[in-house]
Image (spheres, grey):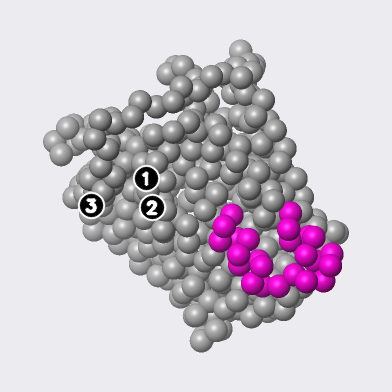
Amino acid sequence: MTSGILGHADFRRLWIADLLSQLGGRLGMMATPLLAVLTLNATTFQVSLLRTCETAAWLLLGLFAGAWIDRIRCLPVLVWADLGRALLFGSIPVAAWFGVLTLAQLYAVLAVAGVLTVLFDVAHSAYPPRLLAPEQLLPGNAKLAANHSFAAVVGAGAGGFLVQWLSAAVTLGLNAVGFIWSALWLRSIRTPEPRPAAAAKPNLRREIGEGLGYVFRHPLLRPIALNTTTTMLFQSASGAVMVVFLVREVGLSPSTIGLLSMAGLLGALAAAWFTERLSARLGEARALLWSAVGIGVAFSLQALTGPGWRLAWYVLAMLLAAICIIVCYILQISIRQRLCPPELQGRVSATMSFVAWGAAPIGSLLGGLLGTAFGLRPTLLISGVATLLGSAWLIFSPLRSLRRIPVAVASEQ
């Protein structure tokens, strides 16, 4: 069957909207720091604050958003979040056209857009079960997950070339167009979405506490959560200074940065293909452990990047990091679903997202501080070594001695 789940008309609209939204977000990730560096002459610390503003909402709202979204219809949230982000990012090329664009506006846009992104992402993950039949969820989620890898590859390359060709501000305007197009596709969905039944006695604090408590009392989920937090912390630290490093120390153009990033991110597509085989050969727990070590090695290799042939270190680091990050992501979800009882799946998922993305703004701020104090290359090396050391959360946990994750563990908690 060639069409598969895409034969479902309303899911096809959701899938197209998600792809457009993902591509827009990836264009923004490439264009925003380049705009700050090339147009606004931002310092290393000022560039790092961009990512901090963009991800701070996860730290502040991540846990609450999940509980709130469970009580309302998702589709209106998706549409309005897209339209709001389009308005915000559309203000950037307008301000640049009139010569009044400032870093303060960029920070404000990213901070408010970050709130809308949290609401969009949480609603997006909760919406497919309300649209699809249970037997359609697996192929549907697989199609949506593929959008992430495709957008990462295409968006990285296209973002660099568009900045080189049109300017960073205009590229962010195209990001706004993508969000509008996404909203139009979402608005065309015709399947009625029922309003969730209201809880008899909703208690937000208790519900959030149950999710947090389950994760951090669990002998297998706790080390996964701690490793994920460490990885995201130092991945964000290195990511906050990477564009500054490539432009000012290595001397690359935006198009070259995009091309090299795209080559590395092809590893994400490969990882989605062979993760199941790797898991079958090593076992889920050991494959997770080795992929976590691989992320630390990859981040450390980034510090070796330089002009000429030393650009190969950047491509190798990006390739290895993309492979290991996708393997980790797939295995973590699989392990979490096995270990978590059905009634806690949503809250445990929100907790894991919170500990991961909540570390991102802190890591970006840390990267800016380290880059200002010690320099850009030392910051990349520190971040890589710290990520490698963070794999110790898994190495010295019960996961080290497991080949497969026993489903019975979930019922014992």
Foreground: 358 or 407?
A: 358
Q: Amino acid at mark 2?
A: Phe
Residue 28 screen position, x and y as percent: 67, 56
Q: Distance between the Cα atoms at labels 3 and 2?
A: 13 Å
Q: In the rendered structure, which amino acid carries the disc numbered 1? A: Ala
On screen, residue 379 above or below 64 = below
Which labelled disc corresponds to residue 354? 2
Residue at the extreme bottom = 373
Residue range (magenta): 90-113
Along the line of sight, the residue nearer the viewer: 254 or 277: 254
Circle 3 packing at 10 Å, graded few (<14), some (14-19), many (20+), is: some
Percent across and percent down for residue 214 are 22, 45
Instruction: Say whether residue 230 is left or right of residue 219.
Output: right
Q: Is residue 342 above or below residue 177?
A: above
Is residue 186 rendered to the left or right of residue 370? right
Picture coordinates of residue 70, whole percent (x, y) = 39, 35
Hey, which residue is sitting farthest left in the picture?
Answer: 412
The reply to whether the C-beta atoms of the residues labelled 3 and 2 are less than 8 Å apart is no
- Disc tally is 3
Which residue was labeled with disc 3? 216
**Residue 7 position within the rendered picture, expressed as x and y whole percent measured from the top left:** 63, 16
Q: Is disc 1 in contact with disc 2, using a CB cutoff of under 8 Å?
A: yes
Q: Amino acid at mark 3?
A: Phe
Residue that lies at the very extreme toward the top in this rendered image: 1
Tell me the residue that label 1 is attached to.
350
Visible in this render: residue 226?
A: yes
Secondary structure state at the residue bearing disc 3: helix
Q: Is residue 100 above or below residue 67?
A: below
Tag 1 secondary structure:
helix
Label 2 Cα crowd, 10 Å radius (few <14 / some 14-19 / many 20+) = many
